[in-house]
Amino acid sequence: MMNTDLIKQFAIEHDCFNKSISGFWNYVNSWKIEEPEEFYEAFNTFDLSSLVLEKWKIALVVNYRYDEPIQYVQTMLNVVFQEKSFAEYRLLQKLNGDVMDDGLSFN
């Protein structure tokens, strides 16, 4: 049997959900500056402060897509707009807690 307490402890020790929330805002604000046309196509003109970020999932992932399997912790937030799920933000962390990557996908 797997011990889910270990992933819960990792989430606390590495502040995964707060890092994800900060990462989301950094991602969105950087996108707005670096690629404004794509940003406005995705978000239109609505006020970003009306978005609600909900804790969603945290998981240990072993990705076999590459020659060597990659292990990481993935923290996911549900991005809600007008009480509907709008997008999913994910933050990937190495097993030592360092951030590897992040991304946003729209529903």
Image (cartoon, rainbow, N blue to C red):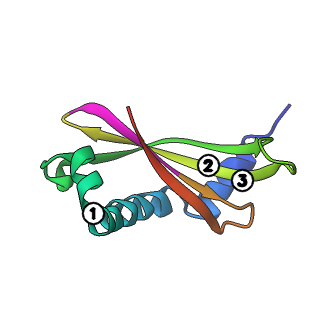
Taking the magenta stretch, the answer to whether it contains residue 65 is no
Q: How many marks?
A: 3
Q: Is residue 31 left or right of residue 90?
A: left
Q: What stretch is highlighted in magenta?
A: 83-90
Amino acid under disc 1: Lys
Task: Look at 17% across and 46% down and name the residue there.
Answer: 44
| Image spot of residue 15 (x, y percent) | 55, 63
| Image spot of residue 70 (x, y percent) | 79, 52
Nearer to the camera, 55 or 94: 94
Mark 1 and mark 3: span between their CA atoms?
28 Å
Q: Is residue 29 left or right of residue 62?
A: left
Vertical comparison of 19 with 103: above or below: below
Mark 2 and mark 1: span between their CA atoms?
24 Å
Amino acid under disc 3: Tyr
Vertical comparison of 29 with 40: above or below: below
Q: Do the residues labelled 3 and 2 touch (CB within 8 Å)?
A: yes
For the residues carrying marks 2 and 1, which lies nearer the camera in this image? 1
Local packing at callout 3 (Cα closer than 10 Å; few below 14, some 14-19, many 20+) is: many
- Check disc 3 and report its element: helix, strand or loop: strand
- Check disc 1 and report its element: helix, strand or loop: helix
Q: Is the magenta stretch mostly helix, strand or loop?
A: strand
- Which circle marks residue 32 in the picture? 1
Nearer to the camera, 85 or 33: 33
Residue picked out by circle 3: 72
Quadrant of the frame with the C terminus: top left
| Image spot of residue 80 (x, y percent) | 29, 39
Residue picked out by circle 2: 74
